[in-house]
Image: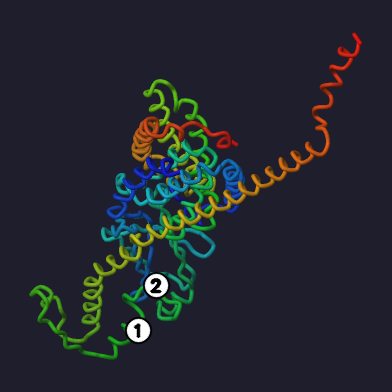
């Protein structure tokens, strides 16, 4: 899912990086002291999850775990996922420094969107509805990210069109897996630490 | 704070337990020279090699020269028609894209210059050494009968070619091992990354705590000041109330 250095055209990198900086600013404002440990934990989860690769046909894709970050952190998912991406670039060589902004946007923006959308249902009196919301958020974050990556690749040039289609197909199993993980996380947090699922005053900017 | 991170710690632990067995899937493209041919290798960073990967070869202006496919070992060969810059590009789909450039100088020298191919295999000084050495006496004790039979009788050009292909063959698994090793995300980098995350967010906590202390001390100073003000003179906030009441109180009087 990480876009590599030298794949995207300059205007896309510029626009993506600018939007990512904006998201980071909003995220840092939304991050209150009480959520910092949760943000750190989700950042570490995201960092390590990328090492879990799932073979898909001749290729493979890896877990991302951005949906859960969006559910718990809201806008604060931006800085958490940015830190994870930066370290993945430096330690594992994923992506690249010039496309760091675009990658941050691709992964964090869908996380925030699904988080915002699913949030009202997470503490719904019926556990089933909360779990469905969590699952849709977990899978939806991946779907949105794949669509964004595909669009960026397709916008860069005709030659990438096949690649762009591939991005979406490859990530279908990842959507299913992360949807299930999100269901489990929501169910678990409802029982153990419901406060994490209730938005604190500053989480939503 | 500890209770906040508890459930998430479980997720992280599960993720960690998979991490050692799993591999990244970065696309790798490397090349070297052999007898004026460019030999390239397409592989994924987990040590598997991409067979039938389409390789687009274009010139310096980006115009497509030809398109070739890699063989079952992920290898492809291309003999440059002219000494000019060649660009190699492959797209395995799903955003797995890799490319490299071979400069004019490299093609002219066959990778023998300092700028030469990025591999120790083939080309380079090895050829010159072989040419100087002339007829070689090979130690055939470790070889199978088939390999011994495959050896040409003397140090002819055919002999050299056979030796080279044999060496290449023998070194291929080693090359793969090296690629896989180089691209492996060791436990150290995982722990290192997690360490950085803890450190960075620790710093954030520290900074937030400082801000909070500052805010609180400013508030405390403000309340101290207003408390002191209340003692020295009547609070202005209390003043309007008696005023508002005063006409009612005053009218009967």
Q: Nearer the viewer, residue B118 or A38?
A: A38
Instruction: Tell me which colouring the rendered structure shows.
Output: rainbow
Residue B144: percent from the left, percent from the top? Answer: 9, 74
Residue A123: percent from the left, percent from the top? Answer: 44, 26
Residue placed at 46% from the left, 41% from the top? A69
Q: Quadrant of residue B171?
A: bottom left
Taking B75 as reference, is A15 left or right? Answer: right
Mark 1 Cα-neighbour bin, 10 Å: few <14, some 14–19, many ≥20: few
Residue position marked by numbered label 1 in the rendering: B125
Residue placed at 61% from the left, 48% from the top? B213
Chain ID for label 2?
A: B
Which quadrant does the C terminus of chain B fall into?
top right
Taking A113 as reference, is A183 left or right? Answer: left
**Dot in front, 1 or 2:** 2
Of marks 1 and 2, which one's residue comes earlier in the chain?
2
Q: Which mark is residue B210?
A: none
Residue B53 appears in the rendering: yes
Which quadrant does the N terminus of chain B fall into?
top left
Residue position marked by numbered label 2 in the rendering: B118
Q: State the residue lying farthest toward the left.
A: B145
Taking B58 as reference, is A52 left or right? Answer: left
Chain ID for label 1?
A: B
Residue placed at 87% from the left, 12% from the top? B248
Q: CA distance from mark 1 to mark 2?
A: 14 Å
Residue B42 appears in the rendering: no
Residue A59: percent from the left, percent from the top? Answer: 33, 49
Report if the CB atoms under discs 1 and 2 are less than 8 Å apart. no
Residue placed at 50% from the left, 42% from the top? A35
Q: Is residue B224 above or below residue B187?
A: above
């Amino acid at each position: 899912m990480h876009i590599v250095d030298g794949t995207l055209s300059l205007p896309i990198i510029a626009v993506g990086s600018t939007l990512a900086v904006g998201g980071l600013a909003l995220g840092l404002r939304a991050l209150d002291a009480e959520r910092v440990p949760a943000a750190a934990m989700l950042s570490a989860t995201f960092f390590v999850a990328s090492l879990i690769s799932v073979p898909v046909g001749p290729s493979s894709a890896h877990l991302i775990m951005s949906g859960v970050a969006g559910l718990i952190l809201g806008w604060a998912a931006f800085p958490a996922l940015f830190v994870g991406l930066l370290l993945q670039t430096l330690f594992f060589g994923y992506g690249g420094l010039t496309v760091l902004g675009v990658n941050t946007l691709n992964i964090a923006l869908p996380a925030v969107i699904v988080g915002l959308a699913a949030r009202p249902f997470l503490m719904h009196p019926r556990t089933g509805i909360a779990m469905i919301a969590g699952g849709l958020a977990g899978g939806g974050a991946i779907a949105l990210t794949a669509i964004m990556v595909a669009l960026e690749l397709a916008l860069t040039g005709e030659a990438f069109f096949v690649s762009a289609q591939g991005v979406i197909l490859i990530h279908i199993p990842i959507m299913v897996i992360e949807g299930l993980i999100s269901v489990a996380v929501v169910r678990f947090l409802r029982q153990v630490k419901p406060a994490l699922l209730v938005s604190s005053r500053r989480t939503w900017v | 704070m500890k209770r906040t991170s508890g459930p998430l710690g479980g997720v992280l632990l599960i993720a960690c337990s998979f991490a050692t067995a799993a591999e990244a899937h970065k696309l790798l493209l490397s090349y070297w020279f052999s007898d004026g041919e460019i030999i390239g290798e397409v592989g994924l960073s987990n040590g598997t090699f991409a067979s039938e990967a389409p390789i687009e070869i274009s010139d310096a202006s980006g115009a497509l020269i030809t398109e070739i496919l890699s063989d079952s070992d992920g290898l492809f060969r291309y003999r440059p028609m002219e000494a000019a810059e060649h660009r190699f590009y492959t797209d395995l789909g799903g955003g797995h894209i890799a490319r490299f450039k071979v400069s004019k100088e490299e093609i002219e020298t066959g990778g023998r210059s300092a700028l030469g191919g990025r591999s120790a295999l083939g080309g380079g000084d090895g050829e010159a050494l072989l040419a100087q050495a002339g007829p070689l006496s090979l130690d055939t004790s470790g070889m199978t009968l088939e390999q011994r039979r495959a050896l040409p009788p003397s140090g002819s050009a055919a002999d050299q070619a056979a030796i080279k292909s044999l060496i290449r063959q023998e070194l291929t698994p080693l090359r793969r091992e090296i690629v896989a090793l180089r691209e492996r995300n060791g436990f150290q980098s995982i722990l290192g990354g997690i360490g950085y995350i803890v450190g960075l967010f620790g710093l954030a906590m520290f900074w937030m705590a400082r801000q909070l202390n500052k805010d609180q001390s400013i508030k405390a100073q403000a309340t101290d000041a207003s408390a002191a003000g209340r003692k020295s003179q009547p609070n202005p906030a209390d003043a309007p109330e008696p005023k508002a009441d005063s006409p009612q109180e005053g009218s009967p009087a």
